[in-house]
Image (tube, rainbow, N blue to C red):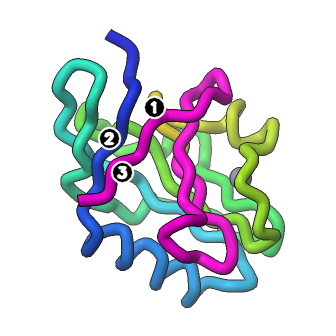
Amino acid sequence: MRLKKIRISREMLLGILAYAFETYPNEMVLLLKADRRGGTATVSGIVFPPYAVGGPYYAILGEGMMPPDPNIIGSVHSHPSGSKEPSEEDLIHGRGPAIMIVAYPYTESSVVVYNKQGERLDLEVF
Ligand SMILES: [Zn+2]
């Protein structure tokens, strides 16, 4: 079944937003672990990617450097530019079915999730 919805606790989301603030004006990238039930995935944890390269314009995960964890459903990265749109690179380099973007100024309403096709997924904060 295709992934349709991501659920994340407010506490975890605020942690991600705080980390994005800390990293600003650079991008940050984190991996998302989740429990998946059908089309819904509930984020259960955050993993710092090994060998992530953070730069002013793009945060890249090295090829083949994803930890071999089947519970990782994708990644979250920041857009210091404020754009909520996924870039072409985001869709090409996205690992797993979920690509979460937190856009500057990093509030709860600046969080969006896409799939690899660039379609918006539902986001529920609980
Ligand atoms: Zn991006």
Q: Position of residue 14 (x, y in %)?
A: 37, 77
Q: Secondary structure at mark 1?
A: loop
Residue at point 17% right, 38% down? Answer: 35
Number of marks in the rendered image: 3
Tell which of 4 and 18 is nearer to you: 4
Q: Which residue is mark 3?
A: 32
Q: Are marks 1 and 3 in contact (CB under 8 Å)?
A: yes
The residues tagged by marks 3 and 2 sit, at their Cα atoms, a distance apart of: 6 Å
Q: Position of residue 89 (x, y in %)?
A: 77, 40
The label shown at residue 96 is: 1
Tag 1: amino acid: Gly
How crowded pointer 1 is (Cα within 10 Å; few <14, some 14-19, many 20+) is rated as some
User: What segment carries the magenta color?
Assistant: 100-126
Q: Which residue is mark 2?
A: 72
Residue 6 lies in the magenta stretch = no
- Which residue reaches farthest top? 1
